[in-house]
Amino acid sequence: MRVHRSEVLVIGGGIAGVATALDLLDSGKSVVLLERDDESVFGGLARESFGGMFFVDSPEQRRQGIRDSAELALRDWYSFAEFGADDVLPKAWAEAYVQRCTPDVYRWVRRYGVRFLPLINWVERGEFRPGNSVPRFHVVWGTGKGLAERLIVALYQHPNAARMNIRFRHRVDHLVTSDGCVSGACGTDESDGIPFEAHAEHVVVATGGINGDLKRVRENWHRDWRTPPDRLLNGSHRFADGRLHDAVAVAGGSLTHMDKMWNYAAGVHHPRPRKPDHGLSLVPPRSALWLNWRGERMGPQPLVSGFDTRRLVTDICAQDRPYSWQIMNLRIALKELAVSGAEFNPSIRDRKPFAFLRDILFGNRWLVKEMLSHCPDFVTAATLPELVDKMNALQGDQAVQLAAVEDAIRQYDATIARGSGLMNDEQLRRIGALRQYRGDRVRLCKFQPIEDARALPLIAVREFIISRKSLGGIQTDLNSRVLNAAGQPISGLYAVGEAAGFGGGGMHGLRALEGTFLGGCILSGRAAAAAISGKFNS
């Protein structure tokens, strides 16, 4: 039995755990950080992410002439969240986030050399409910990988680094309690199978959510989404399995809103999978037609990404078969197809401005080639009958009806042909509105018909629901202290990041405004470190 001792034990080496440890070192605390994964992937799911961060009234917004405020952001947040009457702590965390994200997250990461693209993305604008009134999605120049690496370098090079002990491949199974206080954890060093104990005055759980365990995802599936799909892809971290949620519950902590999740509608199989059911989340092209499993256009409200991600998932799950197709042509794919995450955005990840501009101006040719060549969910053809045959061959049945696909595409193309003054189609109206913002215009076709001889081949993409993030989790107060069923803090125990539903056990409510995940990890981690150091929030 190996034994580790420190003032603070941080369990989990994702962005929330790293942020917590950095601030603890600033306060001179001794820290043991236990991470189950290898050192080569230190940084957790954030390392794989695109790196978008939600800020309010940032310098980048001001330079673009975007007028924003905490009051406006909170109104948008409440609209999207649809909080219940009992969601006191989630509401408090939402208010804290919009008030503190720029001074306590933006300025904090800038201190470590993190930079952002000058043009802010505008996502989750809202559909039937208002969403982001203005653009707030700030993309890290370097993606989430660059963000994680900057903070990890700062951790290793910290003046108090000698007071830190980081252990990789350490799986924590249980929390240790003593006289009603949480005083440590125990588990196994998976590199050699030797058990360990770690003792500390304070224990911080930063182990992510449950969405890496598809069995648990199905067990907590939200009632709005009917029954879980038979085929569900995994876009979460492989160790986001809820193991520490169970340990916290055994220690008396409350779990809440576990059915709240941020899953995506356009998942495809990873061309080179590294885990079971490994999926990628596409950024669905707005100019593509979204069809159901039979090849009928989804509606009556067409599916268009960037407005309400949750509604896309809800509508697809309401179908008899909860998967979908997107139909486009090569021109649309080159201009609009993207994959979320660092892996498939190398020009941003590796900070190569000329490559980034090339992809913007001439199309993302390498990505389209990679997906067409290696992703099993992409098929191409020169004609619609040939395309439908390949779609059915891919699925192994005759579900896709050629007449339905032809009708959807030819009605859409005919509407475009009438001219912009007569485009009585909601998808086309949205494309016209999206193109008014230059952040969308540079990556969006101008009313591109599908059956265009100059834009062939035709492309069909089979898309599944993909599991990604947990919006519920361990209930915490504004100091990230874990609460019991009576709403009282459990002495010595904290939870941060996705493990805590990014704060309070569910600060996003039913929907997220995007970009609040990385920021929520950092803010909740800093809150825990401040409380441990005696700087409590009111």
Image (spheres, rainbow, N blue to C red):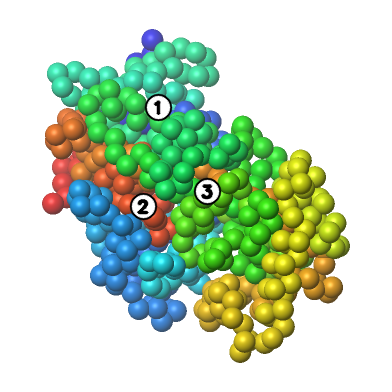
Q: Position of residue 126 (x, y in %)?
A: 42, 67
Is residue 353 shown to the viewer in this render? no
- Crowding around mark 3 (Cα neighbors within 10 Å: few <14, some 14 to 19, many 20+) is many
Badge 1: how crowded within 10 Å, few (<14), some, or many (20+)?
A: some
Q: Are marks 1 and 3 in contact (CB under 8 Å)?
A: no
Query: Which SS class for mark 2?
Result: loop
**Amino acid carrying mark 2 in the image:** Leu
- Mark seen at residue 243: 1
**Residue ID at (39%, 56%):** 512
> Of 453 and 442, which appears nearest the observer?
453
Q: Amino acid at mark 1?
A: Arg
Q: Which residue is mark 2?
A: 510
Q: Is residue 345 above or below residue 227?
A: below
Residue farthest top in this picture:
1
Mark positioned earlier in the residue sequence (3 or 2): 3
Q: Which mark is residue 529?
A: none
The residue identified by callout 3 is 317
Marked residue nearer the N-terminal end (2 or 1): 1
Q: Is residue 248 above or below residue 446?
A: above
**Residue 42 located left or right of residue 158:** right
Label 2 vs label 1: CA separation? 24 Å
Quarter in which the N terminus is drawn: top left
Quadrant of the rendered image containing residue 3: top left
Examine the rendered structure and indicate whether residue 420 appears above or below residue 165: below
